[in-house]
Every structure is written in structure tokens, then in C-alpha cells.
Image (tube, coloured by chain):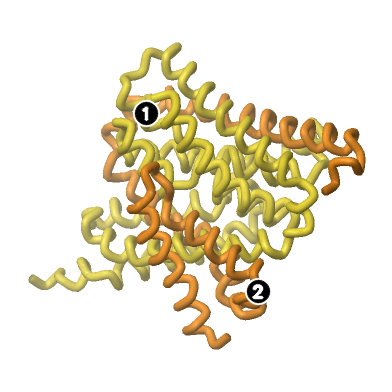
């Protein structure tokens, strides 16, 4: 697909995600819905993966660029942040690696459990 | 007003691109995890604004243009999931289970710590969604009575920590399962962890990208159930 249409599809899906997210009774971010929509389009072969390859590889390669404004916005809440900075750092420093480990071993454990169950559950 | 041009979108976009570009160059020169492009670029931007006494309001218009691409970029993660579908078909239960367990652990452990440190409720509720991606965390924080800006800080710190600690943890504990490592990085450190996971490999990156969305959903569920 030509690049403007690739981008149009991605932005359009985000717009659709916003429309759906206001209808849902629980908080669901529009970009996550947009991701689900694109996955659905790709899986049902309504959109070929080559058709969004260029724009998606660019967007994913520089994903962190799009987060820079959120980082800069912190200077606005510097006062509030400095009041609780060490608590915040401590909490993040302890819980983040632990969350990585808990998730890793939970995923791995479930995987091992399923493989032990053998091919009976393959269907 | 002679400085009106500063308050348009062009200033913020230019400054962001400049700082990010320089941060990428620095990241190539030094391969230290602290040379994280997001961290360096944010610090550079803030440094420029403070040094030149430019108010944040002047940056905001351009900043929101750049953040606009966060939506399509998150959407594009579907391409990675699609390419790794054959993995997910074999591992959907471990992936869902891992995300559910990881996000429950994250919310519960943060809550426990906040109570131990006797933090105010507004801070506690800002920190609870710290493992999920920025737009979800901000929304969850404001829905539960937290401060969205503090949530952004906690999300960034968690992302950076996950990205910095990923390789040392992997080496020390020999976390060799690419699927589980991807799920873990996406669950604990959202998009920043996913950037790291993409560096480690395509499988890790795809599962990490999947985990951002799935864990965001589970975190919303846990918060809705318990608070």
C-alpha cells in the first residue's frame, strides 16, 4: 500500500478505537483496541501484513521517540514528584524486577505444565 | 509578541526530534543501559527548556503532536503479534496466565509497599498502574483518584528499570525462555520494556508487545475488582 494510506489505516483504527472505548463500561485504552482491530484485520486476511509493513516498522523502531513528551511533562509536576521521590524510586526498584520474575516463572510454569499434559490437549 | 512563534507546534516537534536524535547517537556510542534514548532525550529537552527559561507551555503544543503517534505505534504492535502468531497459538494459556499473574502481583506488591510507607491515597492510586503503558496508566490513575502526572513518572521509572535490569537479570538467573521473557518485560515495563525485548529478539519483542495490551486489560480488571 502507498505510505499515506498505510498511515491512514493506522490512524483510522485509532479513531475507531476511541469511538469504541467510550462505549465500553470499563477503562480500555483506545490504542489497545486499535491494536486488536489491526490484529483482527491481519488474521482475517482483510489486510495483508505487507500492506502495513513500512509504516509499522518505522513506528515500532522509534516507539520511544513518541514517549519523550510524556517524559518532558514531568517537569510540570516536579514539586509533587519531589515530595515522594524516594518512596517512588524504592517502590519501583523493588516491584519492577520482582514483577518481571513472577511473570517469567508463571508463564514458563504454565508452559511446562501444558507440555507435560502432552498432545491430548493440543486441540 | 515577538516570541509567539515559540508557542506553535514547530518548536516542540523540532526540540523533541533534535534531543531524540542526539540521544540515539549517544546510545550508539555508549552501549550503557543508562544511555536509554527516552531518558536522555527527556532530560535534554527539560535541560534546554530550563536553561533558556522557556516555559513548559511553549513545548506542549509540539509535544502533543509527537505523542499523537503513540496510538498508531501501539496499533502497529499487532503486526509483530501477527508475525509471531504460530507461537501464540501454542502458548496462549501461558501468555494469558503470565500476564494475569504478573499484573496482579504488580498491583498487590505496589499496594503493600504504599501502605508500609504510609503514602497518601492520591499517591498510592497513582502508583498502582505503574507497570502498564502510559495512556492506560494515566486513565486508571485519574479514575481511581490518583494524579496522572505521578502515574506517568512511575510508569517511566518502571519502564526504564525494566529495560535496564532485563539483561543483568537474564544473565544472572539464566532466563532463557524467549516467550516468558517477552511476556515478563511487557507486563512489568510496557512499551519501554518492549523496546528492550525487540533488541533481544523478534519473539521476545512480539510477546512483549502482546503483554502490554493483555496486562493493561488485566490491570484494569484488578483495579476495578479491588478498588
Circle 2 residue:
A45
Between B44 and B226, which is closer to the camera in this rendering? B226
In front: label 2 or label 1:
2
Judging from the image, mark 2 belongs to the subunit labelled A
Any idea which chain is the orange one in this picture? A
Which residue appears at 48% of the width and 56% of the height? A33
Q: Quadrant of residue A93?
A: top right
Which residue appears farthest toward the left when viewing the image? B1
- Horizontal relation, residue A11 to residue B89: left or right: left
Tags 2 and 1 touching, CB below 8 Å = no
Q: Quadrant of residue B173?
A: top right
Residue A45 screen position, x and y as percent: 65, 74
Vertical order, B74 against B167 (above or below): below
Residue B23 in sight: no
Q: Secondary structure at mark 2?
A: loop
Residue A117 in sight: yes
Circle 1 residue:
B125
Total labels: the figure holds 2
Which residue appears at 32% of the width and 61% of the height? B64
Residue A102 screen position, x and y as percent: 67, 28
Alpha carbon distance from label 2 to label 1: 41 Å
Residue B176 screen position, x and y as percent: 82, 41
Q: Secondary structure at mark 1?
A: helix
The hue in which chain B appears in the rendered picture of the protein: yellow
Between A99 and B154, which is closer to the camera in this rendering? A99
Residue B95 screen position, x and y as percent: 69, 42
Vertical order, A123 against B59 (above or below): above
Amino acid at each position: 500500500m502507498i505510505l499515506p494510506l498505510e498511515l491512514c489505516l493506522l490512524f483510522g483504527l485509532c479513531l475507531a478505537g476511541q469511538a469504541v472505548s467510550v462505549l465500553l463500561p470499563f477503562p480500555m485504552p483506545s490504542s489497545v483496541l486499535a491494536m486488536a482491530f489491526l490484529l483482527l484485520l491481519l488474521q482475517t486476511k482483510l489486510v495483508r501484513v505487507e500492506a502495513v509493513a513500512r509504516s509499522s516498522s518505522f513506528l515500532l523502531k522509534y516507539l520511544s521517540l513518541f514517549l519523550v513528551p510524556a517524559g518532558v511533562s514531568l517537569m510540570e509536576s516536579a514539586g509533587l514528584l519531589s515530595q515522594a521521590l524516594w518512596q517512588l524510586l524504592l517502590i519501583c526498584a523493588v516491584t519492577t524486577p520482582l514483577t518481571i520474575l513472577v511473570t517469567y516463572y508463571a508463564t514458563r510454569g504454565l508452559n511446562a505444565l501444558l507440555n507435560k499434559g502432552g498432545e491430548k490437549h493440543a486441540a | 509578541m515577538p516570541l509567539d512563534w515559540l508557542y506553535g507546534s514547530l518548536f516542540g516537534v523540532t526540540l523533541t526530534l533534535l534531543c531524540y536524535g542526539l540521544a540515539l547517537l549517544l546510545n550508539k556510542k555508549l552501549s550503557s543501559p543508562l544511555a536509554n534514548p527516552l531518558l536522555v532525550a527527556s532530560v535534554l529537552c527539560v535541560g534546554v527548556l530550563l536553561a533558556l527559561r522557556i516555559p513548559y507551555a511553549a513545548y506542549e503544543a509540539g509535544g502533543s503532536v509527537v505523542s499523537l503517534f503513540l496510538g498508531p505505534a501501539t496499533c502497529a504492535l499487532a503486526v509483530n503479534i501477527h508475525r509471531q502468531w504460530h507461537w501464540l497459538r501454542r502458548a496462549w494459556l501461558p501468555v494469558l496466565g503470565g500476564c494475569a499473574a504478573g499484573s496482579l502481583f504488580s498491583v498487590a506488591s505496589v499496594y503493600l509497599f504504599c501502605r508500609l510507607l504510609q503514602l497518601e491515597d492520591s499517591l498510592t492510586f497513582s502508583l498502582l498502574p505503574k507497570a502498564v503503558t502510559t495512556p492506560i496508566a494515566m486513565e486508571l490513575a485519574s479514575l481511581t483518584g490518583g494524579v496522572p502526572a505521578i502515574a506517568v513518572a512511575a510508569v517511566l521509572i518502571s519502564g526504564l528499570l525494566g529495560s535496564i535490569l532485563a539483561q543483568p537479570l537474564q544473565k544472572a538467573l539464566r532466563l532463557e525462555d524467549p516467550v516468558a521473557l517477552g511476556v515478563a518485560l511487557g507486563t512489568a515495563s510496557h512499551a519501554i520494556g518492549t523496546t528492550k525485548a525487540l533488541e533481544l529478539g523478534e519473539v521476545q519483542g512480539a510477546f512483549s508487545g502482546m503483554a502490554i495490551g493483555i496486562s493493561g486489560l488485566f490491570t484494569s480488571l484488578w483495579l476495578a475488582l479491588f478498588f
